[in-house]
Image (cartoon, helix red, strand yellow):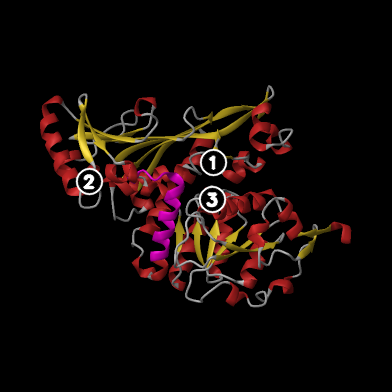
Amino acid sequence: MAADSINRRKFLGVAGLGALLAGTAANSTQASGQIPAPECCTEAPQGMDTLMGQTNLIRLMTLDPAHFHAALVQKKMLPEISKRVAVYAPLEPDLLAHLRLIEGFNTRPVNPTSWELDIHCSLRPLEEMIAARPGNVVVLAGHNRTKIEKIRASVDAGLNVLSDKPWIIRAEDFPLLESVFSVASRKGLVAYDMMTERYEITTIIQRELVNDPAVFGAPIPADREHPAVFMESTHHILKTVAGNPYLRPPYFFDILDQGEGLADVGTHLVDLAQWTLYPNQAINYRRDIQVEAARRWATPITLDQYRQVTDTKSFPGGLAPYIHGGRFNYYCNNQVDYKIRGAQVRLRLLWKWESPAGVDFHHAIYRGTNSSVEVRQTDQTSYRRELFVAAASAERRATIAAAVRAKVARLQDTYPDIGVEPSGHELRITIPDRYRVGHEAHFAQVVEKFVDYLKSPKSMPAWEQPNMLAKYYVTTTAAEVGHSS
């Protein structure tokens, strides 16, 4: 048995992570493949309350981090959050990847963090976390199919939750999602979705312009092929995170675990559509949403590509139904057509192999009776998101230009130095670089908002929960429709 014992400090030290382990609970041993008895975790480790810091601090518990978004929650330290974080996870590569990212934050030359981790390796991380309860906030990312069960167990245990999207990928789990909000409301807990795209500056200003009647008017009464809202998000399988190549775990390609494109990253687009069209308004998914059509298609991946991005030698057996002619058909692309309060929306989610610019791409156009307000990110914009306004007709250009300039002038109080300049027959909104903080930095902004809600749970807007239900109703219903089409 001694030969099968895993020494966690030695394992992590060999991986170059010893600096994170000073004074942590990571130096215990656990027999390989052995599930601890329940009584092993019914009490917190000795002195855990003291180790976690002052009792009025927010204390994070990272549960089974299987996606790098879990680490990005800790890219920036906040005074309200204890520097001591408990991590509960199996002793697997996902944990090691998570710790490497945290160590990278701690050792970066500019504004390094000073996180201290208590690492608990277990085959039953959820049960041990709930039994020990060294914190009051559960952080979740990855393993999307079972995520909602972990969220529900956490709120049942009286814990707040900050979870990456998606919370559900199957329509059959929708009642469980509804129950989470019911329990959280009853217990005064905060269960919050990481909607980072709300903090992207071009999206923020686009929303402001769309909701100025003098600029935008109202959504056009369009059909599916000319919708009032069209958004396309292009992600890439081979990418870097925090400056390093990001290896995808094999289960990333299992759509039963990860979800298809719309069910996963598509949650951002659905959220943006309703957040932009109907700000600060609750959406009733039963009355306000009509999913009309959906389809899906595959991105082919060769064995060499699969090896490159997973560092494994062969396709796993579970992917056999999707392998034809030596290529794996990754069903990650989706399109959905739906109406939200009568406004026609089309969303398209694409996964390609590698970005020509090292970034993912976002395109969003809102077509109004007065003008179209469009975010573009192409080679013509140097692969940066830029915001344009185009009048609905040549006759309206002068009127729309005056309305846009007036709106931007009013926004100067919040966003000094944004401006307007001609760009052919359009107007381009000029945005200083200091507002372009990037996707990874948006996680800190989400955490700051979450902290505000933890301080005062009643300050969370009343529309957040119904709009989360509306969002996941669209994504999961569209996934079902896409399978049958």
Q: Is residue 110 visible?
A: yes
- The quadrant holding residue 343 is top left
Q: Nearer the viewer, mark 3 or mark 2?
A: 3
Residue 421 point in image, percent of width and height? 20, 32
Circle on res. 243: 1
Q: Amino acid at mark 3?
A: Arg
The mark closer to the camera, 1 or 2, is 1
Residue count near mark 1 (Cα–Cα under 10 Å), binned few <14, some 14–19, many ≥20: few
Pointer 3: residues within 10 angstroms few (<14), some, or many (20+)?
few
The amino acid pointed to by label 2 is Asn
286 or 11, nearer to the observer: 11
- Residue at left 10%, top 34%? 399
What residue is pinned by disc 3? 108
Q: State the mark number for residue 211.
A: 2
**SS category of the residue bearing label 3:** loop
Relative height, residue 273 to residue 428 (above, below)? below
Earlier along the polypeptide chain: callout 1 or callout 3?
3
Label 1 element class: loop
Q: What secondary structure is found at the residue carrying circle 2? A: loop
The extreme front residue here reads 109
Q: Quadrant of residue 282?
A: bottom left
Which quarter shows the N terminus? bottom right
Q: Which residues are magenta?
A: 435-452
**Lower sequence index among marks 3 and 2:** 3
- Label 3 and label 2: CA atoms lie apart by 41 Å
Dot 2 surroundings within 10 Å: few (below 14), some, or many (20 or more)? some
Q: Is residue 195 visible?
A: no
Based on the picture, tell me whether residue 68 belongs to the magenta stretch: no
